[in-house]
Image (cartoon, rainbow, N blue to C red):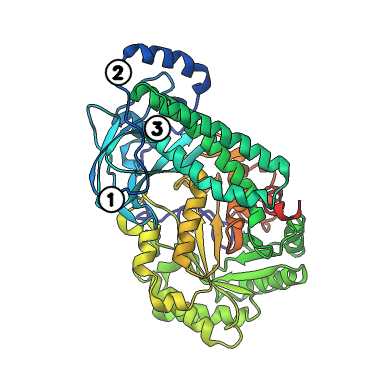
Amino acid sequence: MGHAGGGADGTPRRPRADAEPARSAALSRRKAIGLIAAGIAALVAAVLAVLRLLGRPRPDPVPSPTAPGGGGLVLLDVAAPDGTVLDLAGLLTVQTNGAGQELRDDALLDATTLELVELAPLKRHAEATAALELPATPVCLTLSWPTGHGYSALFADLPGPGHYALAELAARGLHTAQEDIQAQLRQTADSTRVGTIDALRNRTAQALQDCEAAATHAERAVLANAALEAATAAQLAQDDTAALLGPDDAMLGVTFTAPPAPGDSDLAVDRLAGAGRRPLVRIVVEDADDREEIGRWRRCVDELHRAGALVMVQACDSQALTDYDEAAWEQRISALITAFPDADAWETGNELAGEWTGPHAVERTVQAARALAADPATAAAPRVLTLYYQLGQGTQEESVMSWAATNLGEELTGLTDVVGLSVYPQWHPLGAGARRVLEALGRVAGDLPVALTELGYGAEDLDDGPWWFGSATDTGTGREAVARHLTAVALGQPRAWAAPLWWYYLQDEGLLPAGAHASQDGVAGIAQELVDAARAKAE
């Protein structure tokens, strides 16, 4: 894991010193949400009345999205709830939750693959909040953006040159993409769930009609905030239900960062039983040459198998990958194969695309996959490759879909059975953009299954990124919201293999061995949230 996690003894996991650019010493993480999410419903009527008196020219309608691209200038408006059209500085304050321009993450992406086209494309403009120059190919603008539900990866497909409300473009994209999933849910879900989502989508449709009727650009930007709020609520509700559409055999996964005390492995698995799914446990071995540690893990694996769980052995945590030269790496993989010939799956590469994994990450991953494929004891076990999710918060080379297009060569792909994603929303928001990102991951994977193979939020040893989800003030509530939402939407993918391999499972459940570092205090547990998200099939 890159931005968070722990060693096999439960000690805190932090990024290497060079894994992230320098950050502000104090982040005003709660300031900006009021600009957009707070007070929309109460203020909008009065604001619109004033705006209509201004008599400004009516904005152009949204062009048809059927032929985007071709270059040209795009002007984008964003309005505060009081009707003020923000300038670029105001947009960046909202985008970064007050953390400062060094954390801006606006980017132009290929509209289909989500590969990076340009970082920080937004520029100042006298007649709008921001402007950007379109490339010749179809693109979408992405950036971290809040609604009342928290920060999401906002995607705004850009139809062509023109003057638009940013939130309206994003809301239209969500609303349109929901239609196919909603049709599928009508064949599968109960009428109450479908009716709830339909009602939310009707609210979005009305809000989008209101945008079209706006008399001024400023009025349209104010109305767009309500449209995005409605579209996001519908998206999250649909995501929470979409697990009904995923495969029945997709597994509910968690991570063990240390071997639990004798008997606690069974207890950890028992807490997942209500999901009606096969449990998958990833184990994180720190020192493969430490006989005592391997002995504890060997006992743990035996207990997990007796409890009916499958076990995935991680070849190496991303934080430790640069510790190994070629000889030491070969020794580690050999020792793990010897210790766990009965492993049900192997994670050959963890958080590839993370800068901290070093220049030999792909080489080491290929070496591990070759060794596993060549050994008769492990050849049949699925080999899982985990990519590190970020679209615009790092360098251009690290943007995950671009990294995959450049680095997933034929041999590595041929040695891989499952493609997974590691997500830490406090540094890399996902939220309402989760389905689009997971669908892009599916295109990277081709015919292979996909998975959410690492997830964490709100632990004490996580770097405290500027973005939040679920609650701006209560980290525990945010943790639960992240766990429920991303587990459900990941299990709802048509080729879902497992989710979410929650990194802090033992810490959250109070099952770390004596003496290990508990990463958060007073946590009520995460198992029930995972179960509730995953058991949609059984309801």
Q: Amino acid at mark 3?
A: Val
CA–CA distance in space, label 2 to label 3 = 26 Å
Q: Is residue 536 visible?
A: yes
Any part of residue 26 in sight: no
Residue 181 % position (x, y): 58, 50
Q: Eyeballing the image, is 138 above or below 498?
A: above
CA–CA distance between discs 2 and 1? 33 Å
- What amino acid does circle 1 point to? Glu
Residue ID at (49%, 44%): 176
**Quarter of the image holding residue 312?**
bottom right
In this rendering, the label closer to the viewer, 2 or 1: 2
Residue designated by label 1: 118
From the viewer's side, name the closer residue of 179 and 538.
Answer: 179
Q: Are marks 2 and 3 in contact (CB under 8 Å)?
A: no
> Would you call the spot at circle 2 few (<14 residues within 10 Å), some (14-19), or many (20 or more)?
few
Q: Of label 3 and label 1, which has the lower sequence position?
A: 3
Task: Name the residue nearer the viewer: 277 or 25.
Answer: 277
Residue at numbered disc 2: 56
Q: Where on the picture, by quarter, is residue 26?
A: top left
**Which mark, by number, is residue 94?**
3
Q: Of 335 and 362, which appears nearest the observer?
A: 362
Q: Residues within 10 Å of mark 1 (few under 14, many from 20)?
A: some
Q: CA distance from mark 3 to mark 1?
A: 21 Å
SS of the residue under disc 1 = strand
The residue type indicated by label 2 comes to Arg
Label 2 residue SS: loop
- Compared with 49, 506 (above or below) is below
